[in-house]
Every structure is written in structure tokens, then in C-alpha cells.
Image: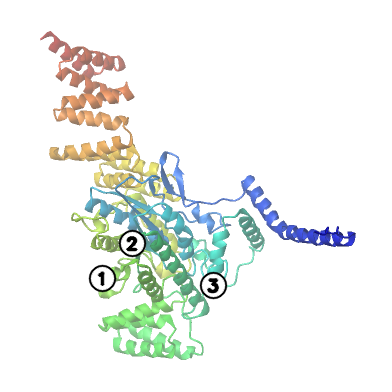
Amino acid sequence: MADIPDPTPEAAEAELSAGTRRAFLVVTALLPVLFFVLLEGGLRLFGYGDDHPLFVPVEAAPDHLTVNRQVARRYFANAASVPTPNPDLFLADRPAGTFRIVAQGGSSAAGYPFYRGASFPQILGTRLRLAYPDREIEVVNTAMAAVNSFTLLDLVEEVIEAEPDAVVIYAGHNEWYGALGAASTESFASSPGLTRAYLALRRFRTVQLVRDAIGSLASLRGGEREAGRPPSNTLMARMIGEQNVPYGGETYRAGVRQFRENLGRILAAYEEAGVPVYISTLASNERDQRPFITAHAPGADTTAWFEAAQSGADALYEERIPEAVELLERATALDTLAADAYFALGHAYEAAGRGAEAREAFERARDLDALRFRAPRAMNHVIRRAAAEHGARVVEGDSAFRAASPGDVVDSRLMLEHLHPNLDGYSVLADAFFEAFVADGLLGGAPRPTPAGALVRLVTPMDSLAGRIRVAQLTAGWPFRPEEAQPFRLDSSRTPPYVLGFAQGVMDGDPWLQSAAALAERYEADGRIRDALVTRRAVVQAFPFLPEAWSGLASLELRRIQAAGQTDRLPYAAGLFQRALEQDSAHVPALAMLGALALQAGDRDAAIRFLERARAEAPETEQVLYNLSGAYLMERRFPEAAALADELIALQPENPRYRALREGIRRDVGS
């Protein structure tokens, strides 16, 4: 074989130069990647940014998780304050047999303005606990104000990781003005796809740095109010980026499109994970909320329209109904997109006894309202179609509201203002979900008969009052008119003034648990037992892992039972004390009361066991010592009874009860 000649110096130099060039190109291409890797690592190392997970541990209960109160900072990066979800708690490791419901949605799903026990998911949970007493029911409400389908989609994977047995959804009103919505000040991009890409990348600290830098630059121009943005301090107003969104226009279509695309992805993710979804159609106030903004059709004769609409409104006011109908029908023919005329026509049709036409006119007026706070019918069409495509169950919430409203037109009998239900409205929505769960046999077996949601909801008077204040604040400003405002007045004949103090404190940030417990104590001191019971039950619903919540309710129920002489209900009170012990086996109030109840029932062995456990935990609790001494005396354990009596006298030498106990023991010993 011939020797292979060595390459010439020129060839070697050429080969080396080609390899060097390739390496240089690779390094050059990787430099930006390396830069961002180093930047991302450095930002994380120095603690910049946050993931804001949906669920976080509970400090007071390490085995529980709760909804992160700061999770909305994902979507409101530069806001001083953000909407907060209800702080519902659940076990990190779901026990076998527990049925877990996770709720998603906006402010109506969160229970605004009352929150907590007023939200339809919690009312649903209460009814399910009554209907299926052998099942543990957990409700985790992730809903919050001013968010829309982008947020729901962003949270889906974390919801799935929580292992829900069912997801309930009430959403669709906020697609234009919710965070990242089509007409929102927090909008990121005109394309839903770009917005979803941003949300997927938002967890990178580099992306958060760029976002914060852009936000800081924008704040430098904060002195200039954006054109068309309303002057108001409410979150509702601050989210408005584009007030006038005419029906069928580009921005209108963008809102419907983003809801359709996002909802399809949401339901597809749950379908793939095997999670049942119950999603409700949307309702809003139609009869009592006139359109916020009327937009006119291009080319419409607005002068002729105004003349016909105003004349029709005048005729309606003067109860010249046939004339009003004729004039308002003319106005709607002159401009088919002007919402005000349809709203007045709905009232005219009602006065004329033409119910079906009235309903259509009211719905048309809502659909055409160019300030897009209330979802148009298109959103319910999207809900039904997406549910059919992905195996979700449609709960006809809109129909439930209509069935409970005169003439099938939803009004202030069930709505607080334009779209948030009142307490009765939330109960109607909860009942619709409950009936769907039962009809599908979701929890298995036959349910026990239960009262309607309105009879089982748990809303403290403090939260009810705070809700009234929030609505008064909301309707006092834009976009509500003066006649639509709901001034707050306290009826002191029905509500003690101290409840107002607690309500305002909670609104200002006072801890809800401490406020509710203190309110219950005030009610008990005033003899307002019914209000105290509602408050105690609401505390148990919110914090079922706290033994103090159960023993507080049990003590109040025991007081009520004893006052009524209903000795047959004593086991019920004992059961509540047992629930306290399930949370903490060393909970002294429950041990002491179970000992006292057992002693009263004649079960001395059980009484002594409970009381000895209580004494071991709190050796100087006088009532425990007194009851245990009496139990020992009944069992003729005289030395132990006498020793406890001596301890009591040492604590209070002049107490006549303790001295009488000691004398009684001496007599029994002597006999």
C-alpha cells in the first residue's frame, strides 16, 4: 500500500481555518443562549421575581394547602394591589373517600361582594354535605375578580395536580375587560396565541424582568390619561382600556374568539386528565340595568333615531303603551345596533303583555351594550358548543335564573347590580349545580333530601354587611348613573352597630377568622343566638381543621339545647366536640365538655377518661378538677376525689362550691 502523503502546509492551514470558522459560528450562535441562561440563573440566585403558585402551604396547618392570595400577580404585575381569591383550605394528601370540588371563574364565581360562604361553590358544598353525610366534601374556590379565560387556562395544570373529582366553572363576563382581555388595560397582545405564549414564558425571570421594565417605562407616562379611560378608583373602571366595543366590531369579535379558543383548551385539558367539568351558562341583570353605552350603526340616521327613541320613552313614561311600542319599534328599525331603544322597547312590550317579545328586546339590549361588562348571548353559545366537543356538562344557570324571575327576565330580585347575583341569586346558581351533580350520580348512591341553597348558605352578618358596603361603593361611581347608585344605610333596629365595625375592619384587612370569632362572642353576649350560630358555622366551614372552630360551635349548640330542655339532642353537641378532638386529640375544651356530658349521661367511665385527659393537658382548669372530683366521688374513689377538692380549695380558698365538695367527700368517707 502506498504511503499517504502528509498534507501540504497550505492544505492544513485551510482545514484548520474551516474548523475554526465552524467553531466560531457555533460559539457565536450559542452566546445569546448562554447570556440568557446566565441572566436567568443570576436573577433566580438573587431572588428576583416569583412563580406565584396557585396553591401554597398553610403555616398553621402544615398538612393543608390553600389558594395563594397573591396568585393574581401573574396577571397584574405592576398593580399596587391585586384581586384575591377566597382562602379555601384542603388537605395536601387527599384522604380516600374525599370528594374534592375545584371552582374556577371571575368575581361572580368568587361570591362578590360577600365572598366565602356566599359563593355558589360553597353553597353547593354545604348542600352536598347534607345530601351525602357519609362523604367528606372539600370545596376549593380559585375564582377571583377581573380575570377571564386566559387566567383559567393558565391555572388548569395546577388545578389538575390538586386531583379534583369535579371542576365547576362560571366564567365569560370578563373576556373584554378582565386581565389580558381584548379591551383591557392589562392586555398583552391582540393575538390570543401570543398572549398564551407570554403566559407560558412568564415563569422565566428574564421575561418578568422585561415585563417589569416595560411597566416602569409605562408608569413614567402615567400622568397622561389614556383616551377614553374612565376616571374612577374601582378595579372595574381601572381595567377599561377601550370603552366603546360595538356589537360585531373587531374588538367584539376578538373577545368572543379568545373565549372560544381558551375555553376549548381548558375543557380539552380536563377531558384528557379525566376530570369531570360542570360549566354554567351566564346570566345578568336585564330588566333593571339599562345599557351603559349605546353605539350607533354606521350610516344610521341618529337624528331620526333619537327623535323616535325619545318620543317612545316619553310615551312609555306617560303610560301611552301602544304609542310607545310603535315609536320604539320605529327607533330600532332606524338603528338596529342602538341598545337604549331596545331596552325601552322591552319595558313597553312588558306593559303591553307581550312577554316573549319583551324578553327578546331585553336580551338584545344587553347584547348591544357597547360597554362589555355583561356577557352577550354569544358567550353562552360558545359554552354549549365547547362543552359538547369535550364532554363537559352544561349547567343551564341562565335558565335557572330566568325560571326564578318574573316573565323569564332576570332583574334585581336576583342581581345586585349589572351582573353579580345577590344571596338568593347565588343560591339559585348553587342549586342548579347541585341538581346536575345529583342527576349524574356524581357522588354515587341516593342523596338525602336537603333544603334549597337559600336555606343552608353560611354567610355571617359581618360579610353580608360588607357586601352591601362594597356594592354601594361600586355603584356610586362610573359607569353607574346617580339613580342606579345604592346608598348604604344601616338598619340599627335589626343590625347592631358593632357589626358595622367588624365589617369595615374586614374590608380594611383585619383577619377574618379573629373578626368572625369576636363577632360570635358579641352575639352570644347579646343573646342573639341565631346570628351567633350562623357565624360559628361559617367559621367551621372556612376552617374545619381548627379544633377551636368546632368547640366554639359545639358550646353554642349545647347552650341552645340546654336552654330549650332538648336533652335528646345532647348527642349532637357531643358529636361536634368529637369533631374538635379529631383535629386535636389534646383539645382541652372538647375533652372537658365531653367528660361533663358523659357524667351527665351516667357514663362515669367515659367521663373519667375524658376528664383525666383534660387534666393531663391543663392541670389547673378548675371546672375539669371539679367534675373529675365528682366523678371519682361517684365511683367511691375517695382519696382521689379529696385530693382534687384540696387542689381546688388551694386555688380559691373561699369558694363555697369547692368547700361544699370537700365537706361532702368527708361525709361520704365517714359513712
Q: Amino acid at mark 1?
A: Ala
Q: CA distance from mark 2 to mark 1?
A: 16 Å
Seen as rendered, the residue at the extreme left is 671
Up the image or down, 499 lies above or below 213; here it is: above
Q: Nearer the viewer, residue 36 or 456?
A: 36
Q: Amino acid at mark 3?
A: Glu
Up the image or down, 389 lies above or below 434; here it is: below
Tag 3–tag 2 contact (CB < 8 Å): no
Q: Quarter of the image containing the C terminus?
A: top left
Q: Is residue 656 something that shows in the picture? A: yes
Name the residue that disc number 2 marks.
422
Left or right: 233 as drawn, with respect to 32: left
Mark before the other along the chain sequence, 3 or 1? 3
Up the image or down, 217 lies above or below 339; here it is: above
Residue 324 percent across, percent down from the top left: 33, 87
Residue 315 percent across, percent down from the top left: 34, 86
Q: Check disc 2 and report its element: helix, strand or loop.
A: loop
Q: Amino acid at mark 2?
A: Asn
Name the residue that disc number 1 marks.
403
Tag 2–tag 1 contact (CB < 8 Å): no
Q: Check disc 3 and report its element: helix, strand or loop.
A: loop
In the figure, residue 277 lies in which quadrant? bottom left
Name the residue that disc number 3 marks.
242
